[in-house]
Amino acid sequence: MLRPCNNHDFESIYAVVNDAAKAYKGVIPEDRWKAPYMSRDELKNEIEEGVVFWGCQEDNELIGVMGIQYLQDVTLIRHAYVRPANQNQGVGGKLLSELRKKTKHPILIGTWADAVWAIRFYEKHGFHLVSAGDKNQLLKKYWSIPKRQIESSVVLADQKWFDTYPAKPNNT
Ligand SMILES: CC(C)(COP(=O)(O)OP(=O)(O)OC[C@H]1O[C@@H](n2cnc3c(N)ncnc32)[C@H](O)[C@@H]1OP(=O)(O)O)[C@@H](O)C(=O)NCCC(=O)NCCS
């Protein structure tokens, strides 16, 4: 069952995120990894900044979460995490399809360049990597992340974004 999360889900979201984020250990740059990957304060801050979490519930437990953040002209998909035991069974795909219906704006997704499985997951759903130049600009414009994280991240966009912002010549 997919449903929007509420205040009572805070600890469950925190648990799902940090369980699933173990996939990053040894993969993303060492200086960007910490345990827990996302602290309660960071999660609280993300929610206060407008990230709305949706969850996939099974047997009264959240097994996957995904956030959506509506900005002026684009919508971001943030913090996609499925419990390791439940990965690769379509949960993330269902959440992504549901959230995509909730905006008319172009959608952007940022993830670690080294998280090849996540990039493959989004590409399977029709998202494409934006150019390195666009990535740097977009991460600065729409995300609040340190410079070091920009270097080791990628941005994927849906077709609507590419149609709205066609590539300029010499754009790298
Ligand atoms: C990325 C993630 C949210 C996808 O959710 P999911 O429920 O596992 O994905 P689905 O079952 O809907 O889709 C499966 C696709 O995702 C990718 N994938 C998911 N889990 C994978 C795994 N453990 N190993 C390799 N590929 C995986 C593959 O592309 C797979 O397609 P394939 O079966 O054709 O190879 C989930 O795997 C996850 O939480 N990963 C760890 C955290 C993470 O990377 N989050 C992304 C943050 S932007």
Image: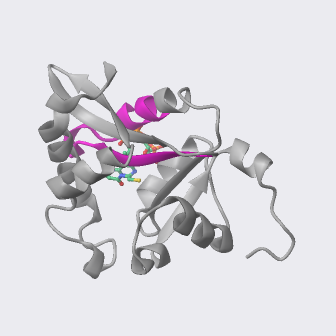
**Nearest to the observer: residue 141 or residue 66:** 141
Q: Is 56 located above or below residue 68 in the figure?
A: above
Residue 71 locus on image (x, y percent): 54, 46
In this rendering, position of residue 96 left or right of residue 62: right
In this rendering, position of residue 130 left or right of residue 146: right
Please check the rendered image and state whether residue 91 is part of the magenta-colored stretch, yes or no.
yes
**Nearest to the observer: residue 84 or residue 145:** 145
- The residue that appears at 39% across and 43% down in the rendered structure is 50
- The residue that appears at 51% across and 47% down in the rendered structure is 76
**Nearest to the observer: residue 65 or residue 10:** 10
Please check the rendered image and state whether residue 71 is part of the magenta-colored stretch, yes or no.
no
In this rendering, position of residue 166 left or right of residue 54: right
**Where the N terminus falls, by quadrant?**
top left
In this rendering, position of residue 171 left or right of residue 125: right
| Residue 21 position by quadrant | bottom left
Residue 11 locus on image (x, y percent): 12, 40
- The residue that appears at 25% across and 37% down in the rendered structure is 86
**Nearest to the observer: residue 169 or residue 147:** 147
- Residue interval drawn in magenta: 74-96
Q: How many marks?
A: 0
| Residue 26 position by quadrant | bottom left
- The residue that appears at 43% across and 54% down in the rendered structure is 118
